[in-house]
């Protein structure tokens, strides 16, 4: 936000130097980025002149201008095509130096001497226009140095305005801050509109079809105006605000935008079909040519200002050429409105079109200032462009918000700030910012009414911040927190850190991805429409259409990372992510979704090569081993169940359980899913709910004595149908062996000769051990016999 120091002084008496003011603004929370000027100071011998006579040069191409410079007329030779008698323009006198270093001298053009130079914007480095001489307003004083006439040395303060302070996006808003900081009085402009002629209802009407997107719309009609150049003072203010003067009508709307922070737009009244306004959504395929000359195709999400037939403005962003104010305009319809910030932001991003107006609509506007800004612009239009203001104003609005009242406790304020600010000082600070303060002596607190322009004030903490920044952060003493500090990570973070350290130690790389996702990602996982992962929370203001929902799974982003790396010739990947997924209890949302901490693992390609060892491709069992290591490190044992998850390969996937609780899935990526994600090799995924795992972890530490008696190891070779799952065999052995079975290890699987078709040989090593004695051979054989009997009875497995 560019603020002219000279303009600022119209509203508040600033008696300190610009650098000191900039420091005060920064310390109070309005950060100053830089201090500059409108255009820098030019040579004092570059002055304002006026052409009093023009004649053709003897060569028939150039012109000889007789120019009044306030002293004696000078003869200047020019080839500019836009000069005319009566114009006022910049004159560089002999001996002056242009910004590019050129020294002006008397020059003879075929016998005619030019005693100076008429200058263009580009030559003075005041703009890019080099097509002709720079034409100045007619009220510019002749003979005055151009720097003084245009206020080029006016200090300009460039402020960074934070998104929560749209009230500071105007000169009056900053003047309000300066008045509070310095203790000076704020002077507001006097607004008075003289109405005449027909009632506005006889001239036009306004229909708002979507009050959600346009909660406030007001309009006036001004007839018999004369469009032309703006007076010098107005052009200076517009230029100081970083804008380009166009004509008196447009410059006035820009002036009020800069002064009060309320965008306005002027339509050529005579070019409105049926002389009326309709605020509506654009129709599919509807197009408009905007003031920048671009034709833009609109969609139904775009709010437009239309007449009876067509769009005439993209609401809150830019007007259309079909109702542009030009030199032939005699009547205008002037608009001041409030549009929904989210809608303006989306449209602006979609069209790639931002403006000073859209920046303000996006952040929010003060409803009480809309008609005041409309009247301010109307007043200036009558004073500068003439015209007749129709009687009345059309206002279409929803119910305006009631004034907010916040309870403020001075003792709590001092306690939170660690300061001892007197209550009277707090009241003075708040009242200087235009808050209405009422003391409640009974409860030792303040009732604070929030002014309508402070959209950011909702809580007591917001008022405490106001007191702190105006009192001065540098005046608050540095103190240590009182009481006993009890820090440390909670169990949830401890488990996440434990898992992270384990996987990093196993050679995996941690990744971090966004919590946003696209609905298309879940469709590409082969999930049916009704699948729970597809029931996601939709984001109201997504950064892009690809990030329009909160993710319900880490799997899509894991696959995205695999693809992204594979497309860059990085095929050997061992990755993991610990992040949140967001699961709604029901849609539409009635409360916040359940945020669940989740672990995702992805493997693809080969493990890193070691010297002397051949490359080793990752497989299902590598992934299973990593998952088992996680559970072992957390002191849990897990079980496996076969699954037919649509994202994973049938027969190479499993559900992971702790006890009877499902805590995750793992397996090889389904070939169809791998093809959709353009993966060059087999990939393996695991997704575990750390929230569910955390609930299974016991806080008690169990310690067993070291065994005093030796163990007995026996090998058992079995002939099993190949339809039997390994987990089923383990469950039977554990159940039949009871407390005497300590370990079971599968060390060989064989299918081939000597093995019947449809069967396979499974070889297990079983460790037997008792706590209170050394087992005899007969005891071991009895348990082994029971195991074999149970396997044959329940699973049809025999001993080889």
Image: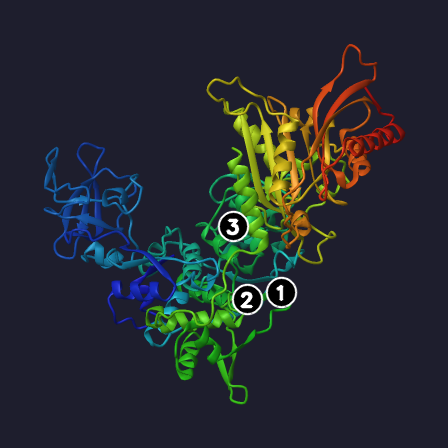
Q: Quadrant of the C terminus?
A: top right
- Which residue lies under the disc numbered 2? 367
- Left or right side of 72 for 33: right
- Judge whether 562 appears above or below 83 on screen: above
Instruction: Please state which of residues 722 and 173 is positioned toward the viewer in this rendering.
Output: 722
Give the quarter of the image for residue 561: top right
Q: Earlier in the sequence, mark 1 or mark 2?
A: 2
Q: Which residue is mark 1?
A: 397
Q: CA distance from mark 3 to mark 1?
A: 20 Å
Q: Is residue 252 above or below residue 108?
A: below
**First in sequence: mark 3 vs mark 1:** 3
Q: The N terminus lies in which quarter of the figure?
A: bottom left
Element at badge 3?
loop
Query: Could one spot residue 331 in this view of the protein?
Result: no
- The residue labelled by disc 3 is 317
Quick one: SS at disc 2? helix
Q: Vertically, is 159 above or below 760?
A: below
Do the CB atoms of the residues marked 1 and 2 lie less than 8 Å apart? yes
Q: Position of residue 122 (x, y in %)?
A: 27, 42
Please tell me which residue lies in front, 726 or 468. Answer: 726
Quick one: 300 or 714, which is closer to the camera? 714
Dot 1, crowdedness within 10 Å: few (<14), some or many (≥20)? some
In front of the other: label 1 or label 2?
2
Residue 18's image quarter?
Answer: bottom left
| Residue lying furthest top | 753
First-in-chain label (3 vs 2) = 3
**Label 2: how many residues lie within 10 Å, few (<14), some (14-19) or many (20+)?**
some
- Residue at 12% x, 54% y is 72
Residue 438 appears in the picture as rendered: yes
Mark 3, Cα crowd under 10 Å, few <14 / some 14-19 / many 20+, is many
Q: Position of residue 785 (x, y in %)?
A: 84, 30
x, y percent for residue 454: 49, 68
């Amino acid at each position: 936000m560019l603020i002219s120091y000279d303009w600022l002084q119209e509203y508040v008496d600033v008696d300190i130097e610009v650098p000191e003011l900039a420091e005060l603004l920064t310390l109070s929370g309005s950060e100053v980025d830089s201090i500059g000027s409108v255009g820098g100071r030019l040579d004092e011998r570059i002055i304002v002149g006026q052409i009093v006579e023009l004649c053709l040069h003897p060569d028939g191409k150039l012109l000889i201008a007789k120019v009044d410079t306030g002293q004696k007329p000078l003869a200047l030779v020019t080839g500019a095509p836009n000069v005319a008698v009566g114009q006022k323009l910049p004159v560089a006198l002999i001996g002056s130096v242009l910004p590019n270093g050129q020294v002006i001298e008397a020059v003879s053009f075929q016998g005619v001497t030019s005693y100076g130079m008429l200058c263009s914007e580009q030559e003075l480095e005041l703009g890019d226009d080099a097509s002709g001489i720079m034409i100045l307003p007619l009220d510019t004083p002749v003979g005055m140095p151009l720097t003084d006439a245009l206020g080029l040395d006016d200090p300009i303060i460039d402020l960074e305005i934070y998104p929560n302070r749209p009230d500071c996006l105007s000169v009056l808003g900053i003047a309000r801050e300066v008045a509070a900081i310095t203790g000076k009085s704020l002077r507001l402009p006097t607004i008075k509109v003289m109405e005449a002629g027909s009632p506005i209802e006889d001239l036009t009407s306004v229909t708002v079809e979507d009050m959600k997107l346009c909660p406030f719309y007001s309009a006036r009609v001004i007839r018999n105006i004369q469009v032309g150049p703006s007076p010098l003072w107005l052009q200076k203010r517009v230029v100081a605000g970083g804008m380009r003067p166009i004509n008196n009508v447009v410059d006035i709307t820009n002036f009020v935008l800069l002064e009060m922070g309320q965008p306005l737009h002027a339509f050529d009244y005579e070019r409105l079909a049926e002389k009326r306004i309709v605020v509506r959504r654009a129709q599919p395929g509807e197009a408009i040519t905007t003031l920048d000359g671009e034709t833009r195709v609109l969609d139904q999400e775009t709010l437009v200002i239309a007449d009876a037939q067509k769009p005439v403005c993209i609401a809150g962003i830019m007007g259309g050429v079909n109702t542009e104010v030009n030199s032939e305009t005699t009547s205008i319809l002037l608009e001041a409105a409030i549009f929904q910030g989210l809608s303006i932001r989306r449209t602006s991003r979609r069209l790639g079109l931002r403006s000073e107006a859209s920046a303000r609509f996006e952040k929010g506007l003060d409803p009480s200032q809309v008609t005041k800004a409309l009247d301010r612009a109307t007043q200036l239009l009558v004073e500068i462009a003439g015209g007749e203001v129709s009687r009345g104003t059309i206002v279409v609005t929803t119910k305006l918000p009631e004034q907010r009242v916040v309870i403020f406790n001075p003792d709590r304020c001092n306690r939170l700030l660690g300061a001892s600010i007197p209550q009277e000082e707090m009241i003075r600070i708040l009242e200087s910012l235009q808050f209405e303060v009422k003391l409640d002596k009974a409860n030792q607190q303040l009732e604070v009414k929030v002014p309508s322009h402070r959209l950011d004030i909702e809580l007591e903490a917001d008022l405490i911040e106001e007191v702190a920044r105006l009192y001065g952060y540098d005046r608050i003493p540095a103190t240590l927190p009182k009481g006993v500090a009890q820090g440390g990570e909670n169990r949830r973070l401890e488990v996440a850190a434990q898992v992270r350290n384990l996987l990093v130690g196993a050679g995996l790389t941690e990744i971090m991805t966004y919590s946003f996702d696209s609905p298309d990602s879940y469709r590409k996982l082969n999930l049916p429409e009704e699948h729970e992962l597809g029931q996601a929370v939709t984001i109201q203001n997504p950064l892009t259409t690809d990030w329009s929902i909160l993710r319900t799974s880490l799997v899509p982003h894991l696959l995205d990372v695999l693809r992204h790396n594979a497309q860059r010739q990085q095929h050997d990947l061992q990755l993991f992510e610990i992040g949140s997924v967001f699961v709604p209890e029901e849609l539409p949302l009635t409360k916040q979704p359940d945020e669940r901490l989740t672990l995702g693992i992805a493997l693809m390609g080969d493990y890193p090569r070691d010297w002397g060892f051949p490359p080793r491709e990752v497989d299902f069992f590598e992934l299973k081993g990593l998952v088992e290591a996680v559970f072992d490190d957390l002191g849990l044992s897990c079980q496996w169940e076969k699954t037919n998850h649509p994202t994973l390969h049938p027969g190479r996937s499993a559900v992971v359980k702790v006890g009877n609780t499902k805590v995750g899935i793992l397996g090889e990526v389904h070939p169809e899913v791998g093809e959709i994600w353009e993966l060059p090799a087999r990939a393996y995924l695991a997704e575990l709910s750390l929230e569910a795992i955390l609930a299974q972890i016991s806080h008690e530490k169990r310690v067993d004595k070291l065994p005093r008696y030796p163990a007995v190891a026996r090998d058992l070779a079995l002939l099993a149908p190949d339809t039997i799952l390994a987990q089923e065999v383990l469950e039977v052995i554990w159940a039949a062996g009871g407390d005497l079975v300590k370990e079971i290890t599968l060390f060989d699987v064989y299918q081939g000769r000597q093995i019947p078709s449809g069967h396979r040989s499974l070889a297990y090593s079983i460790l037997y051990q008792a706590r209170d004695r050394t087992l005899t051979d007969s005891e071991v054989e009895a348990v082994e016999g029971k195991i074999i009997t149970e396997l044959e009875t329940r699973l049809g497995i025999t001993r080889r």
